[in-house]
Image: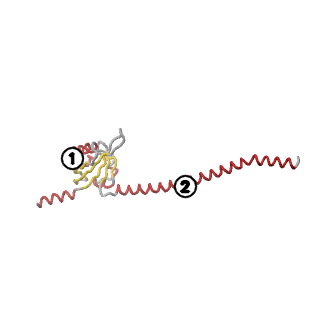
Amino acid sequence: MSDNTEKQRIDEITQSELPLVNREAHMLHELKSHQLKLEMQNLDLRKTREQLEEAHDLYADLYDFSPVGYLTLDEDGCVLEANRTAAILFDQERTNVVGKPFANWLAPGETGTFLAHLKQTLSSTSNVVFKTKIMATGKVRDIRLESSASHNAPGKMRHCRTVMTDITQSRLAERRTKQLL
């Protein structure tokens, strides 16, 4: 073969490989571009996860260490959720409160009025206030309940969100004031 023919053949091979080299370079560029985008998205996801964890921790602190008890009750008055303060008001561990009927801690004679409060709350669109007495390890406590119904999707069980405040000391002060007068 002549040098000219061989050079022509090399030029043909190089030109036929050129699109392949260009395609490979383009694909490599695309992959690097996608990798950069994924790294940026991953960084954004990590920041969002950290923010969500901080918000969760703040919520948990506010919920658990609130000066009032928070309860979520089902339609039958069974405790679905309780914060630390609610468990303390019952003189129980939280695990001994969740899943149990709220009526377990009511003073004798209070169950009927509590169930009426629950029924009224679940049929109301505003907060419902109720004062009752609970028994906790032999002590009677005056409690103020302020409850509202959760608004779930149709067909789902409604819940009662309740704020439970110990008003025993203020009730004692009221009684003493009346006695003095």
Q: Position of residue 2 (x, y in %)?
A: 88, 48
Kind of residue sitting beneath label 1: Glu
Q: Secondary structure at mark 1?
A: loop
Residue drawn at the location 23% of the way across and 56% of the way down? 167
Single out the mark in the foreground, 1 or 2. Answer: 2
**Spatial separation of the CA atoms under disc 1 and disc 2:** 59 Å
Q: Secondary structure at mark 2?
A: helix
Residue that protrudes farthest toward the bottom in the picture: 180
Q: Position of residue 67 (x, y in %)?
A: 30, 58
Task: Categorize mark 2 by other alpha carbons within 10 Å: few (<14), some (14-19), many (20+).
Answer: few
The residue that mark 1 highlights is: 110
66 or 92, nearer to the observer: 66
> Is 59 drawn above or below residue 158 in the view shown?
below
Report whether 61 appears left or right of 43.
Answer: left
Residue drawn at the location 41% of the way across and 56% of the way down? 55
Report whether 105 appears left or right of 48.
Answer: left
Which quadrant is home to the C terminus? bottom left
Residue that protrudes farthest toward the right in the picture: 2
Report whether 109 appears left or right of 18.
Answer: left
| First in sequence: mark 1 vs mark 2 | 2
Assess whether mark 2 and mark 1 are in contact (beta carbons under 8 angstroms): no
Report whether 9 appears left or right of 125.
Answer: right
Q: Which mark is residue 40?
A: 2
Task: Categorize mark 1 by other alpha carbons within 10 Å: few (<14), some (14-19), many (20+).
Answer: some
Kind of residue sitting beneath label 2: Met
Q: Position of residue 153 (x, y in %)?
A: 36, 41
24 or 54, nearer to the observer: 24
Residue drawn at the location 26% of the way across and 50% of the way down? 146
